[in-house]
Amino acid sequence: MKKTRDGYTEAHASSGIDAKLPAIETWPNQFKGYAITIEVPEYTAICPKTGLPDFGTIRIIYVPDKLCMELKSLKLYIHAYRNIGIFYENAVNRILRDLVAACRPVHARVIGEFSARGGLRSTIEARYP
């Protein structure tokens, strides 16, 4: 296993990207041309390098096409991250990937605003298309 100068491995870098998570369910959209914003203020996951918990807020903004995300299944999906080792960047991009696979929106943004750790706060944003 190849390590970087700081001890990070490919396993650290890809941790959580393909972990099994609950499905995001959908329901048929009845309207066009509007945006949905969902805020999840209690996101938690585990840092794959240190094993320490990460906390933050996930904001999902999407314009549905034929399908909308069902909120209870989204809640279960997001809460499943609390037992997964995954970096912030990977979590935000994975959430976007899974959202797009589930409901094929017109466009979508996922923004992760993560709590300060070591005096630094991170905000990660991923967009589709």
Image (spheres, grey):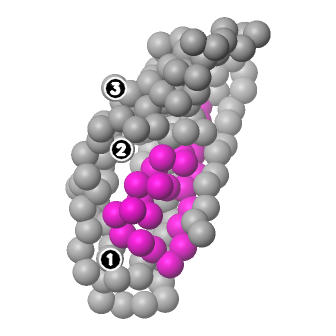
Amino acid, disc 2 = Ile
Return the residue at label 1.
Answer: 67
Question: Disc 2 to disc 1, how far (Cα)?
Answer: 19 Å
Between 102 and 114, which is closer to the camera in this rendering?
102
Between 40 and 85, which is closer to the camera in this rendering?
85
Q: Which residue is drawn at 39% across and 62% down?
A: 101
- On the image, which quarter does residue 19 sit in? top left
Q: Does the magenta run of residues contain 111?
A: yes
Q: Residue 129 carries which label?
A: none
Q: Does the magenta run of residues contain 106?
A: yes
Mark 1 surroundings within 10 Å by alpha-carbon count, few (fewer than 14), some (14 through 19), many (20 or more): some
Magenta region: which residues? 92-115
* Disc with the residue nearer the chain's start (3 vs 2): 2
Mark 2 surroundings within 10 Å by alpha-carbon count, few (fewer than 14), some (14 through 19), many (20 or more): many
Question: Which image quarter is the N terminus in?
Answer: top right
Return the residue at label 2.
Answer: 78
Q: Looking at the image, is 79 positioned above or below residue 82? A: below
Return the residue at label 3.
Answer: 83
Q: Looking at the image, is 105 positioned above or below residue 4? A: below
